[in-house]
Image (cartoon, grey):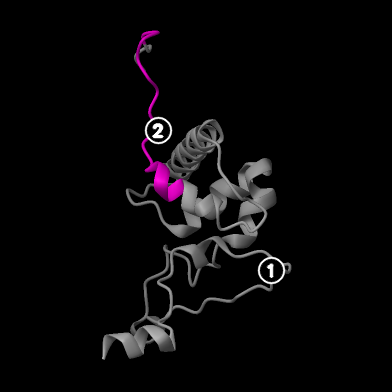
Amino acid sequence: MAEEEPGDAIRPEFPMGRIKKIMKLDKDIGKVNSEALFLVSCATELFLELLAEKSSEVAAEKKRKTVKLEHIRIAVKRHQSISDFLLDSLPLPSQPSDAPAKVENRTRVVVDKVAPEGTRRIDDFFRRPAKTASAETNET
C-alpha cells in the first residue's frame, strides 16, 4: 500500500448515506454524528476486507477460484472474534461444493434461527420490502 500524504483525505469506499440508513435501523439511534459515521464506515470497510481476505485464503487452500459460502463459514470459524457474532447469521450450506450437484436438489433450504427479540438477521436488510396495501392502492 502506498503511504498517504498528510494533506490527502481518507475517504471510505462505501456510500455514507447507505451506512447512515443501516445505522438508523437501530431504534436507539436518533442522530448520527459525521465523525461516528466516518468511523463506522471505515470499520465496515476494514471488516469486509478481513473477511474477504480470510475467505479467499480458505478457497485457495481448497484449490478453488471462487469463494463460496462454505469458505466464508470456515474463515469465520477460524477467527474467534468474528465467529462470536457472525456465525449464527450465516445461512447453513445446502451441500458441500466438492460433491456433484444433483438436479433434484436445486432448491435451497434456509433454516431460520430464532433471533433474540429486537434483533434482525443481517440478510433481512438486503431483502426487498414487501408491498403494503396502501402502496398497492396508489399504483392502480
- For marks 2 and 1, the one nearer the N-term is 2
Q: Nearer the viewer, residue 110 or 60?
A: 110
Query: Label 2's element?
Result: loop
Q: Nearer the viewer, residue 96 or 81?
A: 81
Rendered location of residue 58, percent (x, y)? 47, 45
Which stretch did the figure color magenta? 5-19
The answer to whether 1 is drawn above or below residue 120 in the figure is: above
Outermost right residue: 116
Residue drawn at (73%, 69%), measured in percent from left and top?
Answer: 117
**Is residue 84 among what the camera can see?**
yes
Q: Quadrant of the C terminus?
A: bottom left
Query: Label 1's element?
Result: loop
Badge 1 amino acid: Ala
| Main SS, magenta residues | loop
Rendered location of residue 123, percent (x, y)? 50, 64
Q: Is residue 108 magenta?
A: no
Q: Nearer the viewer, residue 20 or 88?
A: 20
- The Cα–Cα distance between marks 2 and 1, rounded to whole angstroms, is 31 Å
Q: Nearer the viewer, residue 81 or 134?
A: 134
Outermost left residue: 140
Badge 2 amino acid: Pro
Rendered location of residue 81, percent (x, y)? 67, 41
Residue at which label 2 appears? 12
Crowdedness near tag 1: few (<14), some (14–19) or many (≥20) residues, C-alpha within 10 Å: few
Tell me the number on the disc at residue 48. Answer: none
Q: Is residue 14 magenta?
A: yes
Residue at which label 1 appears? 115
